[in-house]
Amino acid sequence: MRTDRASEIIRLVSQKNIHPSENISEFPVNITDCTQIIMPEEVFFTIAFLGIVENLLVLIAVWKKKNLHSPMYVFICSLAVSDMLGSLYKTLENIFIILCKKRYLTCQEDFEKVVDDVIDFMFILSLLGSIFSLSAIAADRYITIFYALRYHNIMTLQRALIILVVIWVFCAGSGIAMVIFSHETATVLSFSILLGFMLVFILCLYIHMFLLAHSHARKIALLPTSTIHQRANMKGAITLTILLGVFLCCWAPFVLHMLLMTFCPHNPYCVCYQSIFHVNGILIMCNGVIDPMIYAFRSPELRNSFRRLFCCRKPSWK
């Protein structure tokens, strides 16, 4: 799906015989006066490293603490995997560009196309995995709030795992199809429609949750510990709201970049927007860094698991 400048940069390196010491930013990729914003490789690698480590810690913390083996945390682990893919995809892309610039790799056209397809696949898998994981978390929160008494019968751990298998198989299949037909306008259009549909689905669940949760709480107010459970469930819904907001802020600029490249590649305004491509890439990786912080800040259980993971237990004499 040629979502980035990787292939273009590599062709410049391989076809124009650029010397390794020359700055790649000196070769403009547009015909406007907009200055191409180039982020240092160190920034990419630092943010990517933080995102990979933080999400790995989330996966390990959930795996080691048995009381976190629940559908909600299984879906959170799925989102963590998606965030890791977002960091890995940009990391591999930048490593490949650096190796080509330094002439450690012979970037022939066939080899470049294979690598570019793999990078594009990881990008699509990360984006689809994130939006479907958020959708699964939203559905889980919806069931928790409105079917609290039957939740454990409706959403079992086994069903959650089956849902995740279906999600990732669908995302992988969609990613392969989109890479194969990446040059078709219909592919980008269907991809955008799918993302829009999933966002509308989540927003509809939100509207229903927040409009009816208060009245639903009154109906079960006489049940023992209902207030405590209702507050916990609404806290989970608010956490999901924050996650979705961060996702939109981090991914929307890149998706817009992809649409502009497809539908108005020669428009001066569209080309000018593409000059901030590296900033959009940084935002994607920031999503992988911010999400684990949201989990840790909003979930006491996950914080306790992190403490145990780092052996930060309170002294027995206290």
Image (cartoon, rainbow, N blue to C red):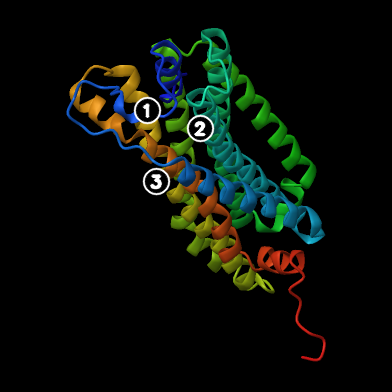
Name the element at disc 2. helix
Residue shown at 76%/49% (left/top)?
153
Q: Is residue 278 visible?
A: yes
Q: Earlier in the sequence, mark 2 or mark 3?
A: 2
- Front: mark 1 or 3: 1
Q: Earlier in the sequence, mark 1 or mark 3?
A: 1
Check if mark 1's residue and mark 3's residue have beta carbons within 8 Å. no
Name the element at disc 3. helix
Residue assigned mark 2: 94
Vertical order, 179 against 43 (above or below): above
Q: Which residue is at the front of the view, 260 or 195?
A: 260
Q: Amino acid at mark 2?
A: Asn
For label 3, the crowd category at 10 Å Cα-Cα, with few meaning under 14, some 14 to 19 and many 20 or more, is some
Residue 57 sits in quarter? bottom right
From mark 2 to mark 1, how far is it between C-alphas? 12 Å
Residue 195 on image: x %, y %: 46, 31
Q: Earlier in the sequence, mark 2 or mark 1?
A: 1
Vertical order, 146 against 158 (above or below): below
Q: Which residue is at the front of the view, 175 or 219?
A: 175
Residue assigned mark 3: 249
For label 2, the crowd category at 10 Å Cα-Cα, with few meaning under 14, some 14 to 19 and many 20 or more, is some
From mark 1 to mark 3, how far is it between C-alphas? 28 Å
Q: Which residue is at the front of the view, 276 or 8?
A: 8
Residue assigned mark 1: 24
Q: Amino acid at mark 1?
A: Ile
